[in-house]
Amino acid sequence: MATTREIVNPAAEIQARTFDVRKIREDFPILRQKMHGKPLVYLDNAATSQKPQAVIDALTHYYTQYNANIHRGVYLLSERATQAYEDARIKLQHFLNAAEQREIIYVRGCTEGINLVAQTYGRKHLGAGDEILITAMEHHSNIVPWQMLCEEKGCRLRVGPINDRGELLMDEFEKLINDRTRFVSVAHVSNALGTINPVKQIIELAHARNIPVLVDGAQASPHMKVDVQALDCDFYAISSHKLFGPTGVGALYGKAKLLESMPPYQGGGDMILSVTFEKTIYNHIPNKFEAGTPNIAGAIGWGAGLDYLARIGMENIASYEHALLTYATEAIGQIPGVRLIGTAREKTGVLSFMLEGIHPHDVGTVLDQEGIAVRTGHHCAQPVMDRFGVPATVRASLAFYNTKQEINALAAGLEHVKAMFA
Ligand SMILES: *Cc1c(COP(=O)(O)O)cnc(C)c1O
């Protein structure tokens, strides 16, 4: 991916030469635990990620040293809280390579980011007969907000199909773009399949017809370098908790011009410049979209997490995980009875699979006894399950603190499951 702004980060370069997963694991206190007497093997990173000590410390530090409400107090404590909260916004700006810090809106998570766009941009600009284009591999968060808009406005949801590997069929997708298409919203990476979508190409296709594009970046952001300017996306939504930060906070990137043209999402404190009973003047972006007291601690903790990631380097994370995925695909894929669901040529570390004749729930329950945490179910992507004709899958999803030994433990665990149900 081309970047407009190459930062030479000496710390990251040192890490690159010495990417030592054992050292990295020491930064994550939760990973030291045992489950049912076995070392915890945490392979549910697509549901939520674990937090490095730096994030936990930042939360504690905020609550012990400078807890106060932001943007209001004239006293030092509140100034310190405001500063840290706004510093984290700048860290997010750099993380996504946004042009301006006011293009970063704090939200509750990726879900709220998408709902914000549907409820503001969507309600303002879409009407009866207009079409919204998504893909067949979306998370429910990138389906339901658009369905709600369609119901209200009489627009129509169109869905780009995927092939048996779980890749978007670009020809079909392109054919679905027409004069009625008013919005495109796609996952950068599928949480159920791991597929990396060609979002840059999708954005170019849509922009050729002046259609704005939202990218759901919940699963891409923890695994690769994201550059919203290089992508030229109009919106990009992410969640802190999937990105090694606290729960309850996320960010929506939006191009300043678009955000300025959009009506507010929620009304309340902080989103106004002045209020009388006759007329309220709304605040500028980003505050216009941040009504009420936000998740101050969460934002600050997230900022510490982004610093931590910058020290390791997203490129280093991506290359380590790529090697681990290759290893895992081989190790798990060769087990007799395993059917991998989602074998895209471009994918992140998600292994969704079926074990022949055994319900995914049973697989997950037995693996848990071995200390192995995997997700079983539809992964908030029921249409994906329907596409592959399965009710559920077992999903092992990787992060940069996972190891080959843990993949070996999963493989051994699956042999154990098979033996139990034989
Ligand atoms: C997790 C996820 C979401 C929703 O994120 P929340 O943090 O639950 O709001 C949306 N899209 C994808 C692809 C996800 O993996």
Image: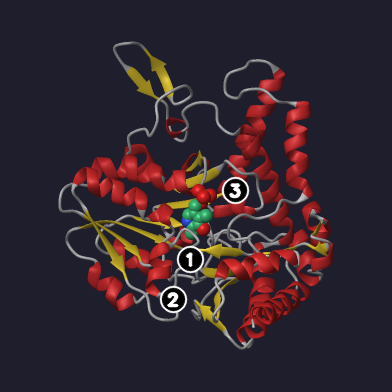
Q: Is residue 390 above or below residue 207?
A: below
At 17% across and 61% down in the image, what residue appears?
A: 179
**Image quadrant assignment for residue 398:** bottom right
Do residues under tags 3 and 2 come within 8 Å of each other at their CB atoms?
A: no
Q: Is residue 314 above or below residue 280?
A: below
Q: Is residue 20 above or below residue 246?
A: below
Q: Residue under label 2, please give it.
A: 166
Please state the horizontal and vertical placement of residue 115, each as a whole percent of the image. 39, 44
Do residues under tags 3 and 1 come within 8 Å of each other at their CB atoms?
A: no
Indicate which disc, 2 or 1, sits on the residue closer to the N terminus.
2
Question: Is the residue marked by circle 3 packed among few (<14), some (14-19), or many (20+) residues within 10 Å?
Answer: many
At 69% across and 68% down in the image, what residue appears?
A: 367
Question: Is the residue marked by circle 2 packed among few (<14), some (14-19), or many (20+) residues within 10 Å?
Answer: many
Residue 291 appearing in the image: yes
**For disc 1, does the CB lie below 8 Å from ligand 1?**
yes
SS state under label 1 = loop
Distance from disc 3 to disc 1, alpha carbons, whole Å, reads 17 Å
Q: Residue under label 1, please give it.
A: 190
Do residues under tags 2 and 1 come within 8 Å of each other at their CB atoms?
A: yes
Question: Is the residue marked by circle 1 packed among few (<14), some (14-19), or many (20+) residues within 10 Å?
Answer: many
Q: Where, quadrant-wise, is the C terminus in this rendering? A: bottom right
Indicate which disc, 3 or 1, sits on the residue closer to the N terminus.
1
Badge 1 amino acid: Ser
SS state under label 3 = loop
> Which mark identifies residue 240?
3
Residue 217 appearing in the image: no
Q: Residue furthest top?
A: 277
Q: Who is closer to the viewer here, 336 or 278? A: 336
Please state the horizontal and vertical placement of residue 16, each as a whole percent of the image. 75, 69
